[in-house]
Amino acid sequence: MRILVTGAAGFIGSHLSDKLVLLGHNVLAVDNLSLGREANLEQLKGNQSFEFLRGDVLDADWFEQLFDGRSVDCVFHMAANSDIAKSHADPTVDLNDTFRTTFAVLEAMRKADVRQLVFASTSAVYGEVEGRVAETFGPLKPISHYGAAKLASEGFISSYAENYGIRGWIVRFPNVVGARSTHGAIYDFVHKLRRSPSRLEVLGDGSQEKSYLSVVDLVEAMICVWRSTNAQTNLYNVGSPTTSTVADIARIVVEEGPQSAEIVYTGGDRGWIGDVPKFAYDSSAIQALGWKPSMTSDEAIRAAAKAAWTEIR
């Protein structure tokens, strides 16, 4: 199949592109490089099954013309804002980069008669809830602009599926970690320790607790959902049954670093406005498809910490 990947030069998009090429698909990779890095795709350059185009999904003329003559079979839409705290200061970041990019993809698909869309959604659509959350939970009340924009995107995917025959696979991600990451607690902690090796300041009290998943496991989960289900709109949580606290992350990052460091907490139950301090998925639906993570939450964090210490200079 010819698969278009938006946000392909990003953390998750680049790992997804690697896997799709490995599986024998032809990948058309698109990224405006505002967050992504072309270096993330270096290993695919020269591969006859891979093509990279620098451009913006929100440039409608450019993006819609991209489909002409290329016979795209499926779109994996990964492009979005990835900095929740940033959109608190400027809500238009998520309006444009998270929601309007989805609408632009759907419109281009409608006009080009492309019928398959795999969408990178998020646990942030649920908001702040207690217990393990299944796909049937509702009502959904996101507390970040990012979560709201992803939820609005899910709604438009559902309506386009009904109105125009597009089949959608909506995959709600947990916290994803691994090589090539450019944000998140592990990335931030390593940067802080590079600047001040003996002291690590951590936002909140360290008790924040969520599931952390290796990017390699996430990519396998996305492809599993895409291959294994065929409803008009398919919706799945992806997560590990295990969780980790922010205190665990801080400890592991220090352990994987070159020296010991004092860990200091700023206090409070969350790191920033819009941050959900505790969250756990019910992932039984995707496990019933035969997928399960290869690493626990702590193991994924440790592997990601090792990669971050190598990558961040």
Image (cartoon, grey):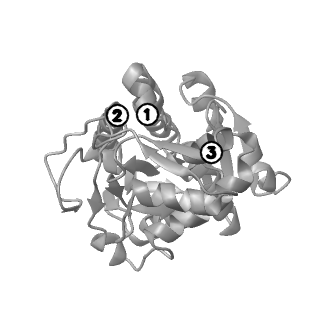
- Nearest the eye: 136 or 169: 136
Regarding residue 4, the answer to whether it shows in the image is: no
State the residue lying farthest toward the right.
46
- Nearest the eye: 263 or 85: 263
User: In the rendered image, which residue does mark 2 sit on?
Assistant: 149
- Nearest the eye: 132 or 307: 307
Spot occupied by residue 39 in the image (x, y as percentages of width and height): 77, 45
Q: At 74% from the left edge and 49% from the top edge, which residue is drawn?
A: 41
- Nearest the eye: 254 or 25: 254
Quadrant of the image containing the C terminus: top right
Say how many tags the image has: 3
Marks 3 and 1, how far apart in space? 31 Å
Three-letter code for the amino acid on which mark 2 is drawn: Ala
Tell me the SS state at disc 2. helix
Mark 3 or mark 1, earlier in chain: 1
User: In the rendered image, which residue does mark 1 sit on?
Assistant: 98
- The reply to whether callout 1 and callout 2 are in contact (CB within 8 Å) is yes
Is 165 above or below relative to 19? above
Q: Residues within 10 Å of mark 3 (few under 14, many from 20)?
A: many
Q: At 33% from the left edge and 39% from the top edge, which residue is drawn?
A: 147
Marks 2 and 3, how far apart in space? 33 Å
Residue 41 badge: none
Residue 92 lies in quadrant: top left
Mark 1 or mark 2, earlier in chain: 1
- Marks 2 and 3: which is nearer the front? 3
Marks 1 and 2, how far apart in space? 6 Å
User: In the rendered image, which residue does mark 3 sit on?
Assistant: 193
Three-letter code for the amino acid on which mark 1 is drawn: Thr
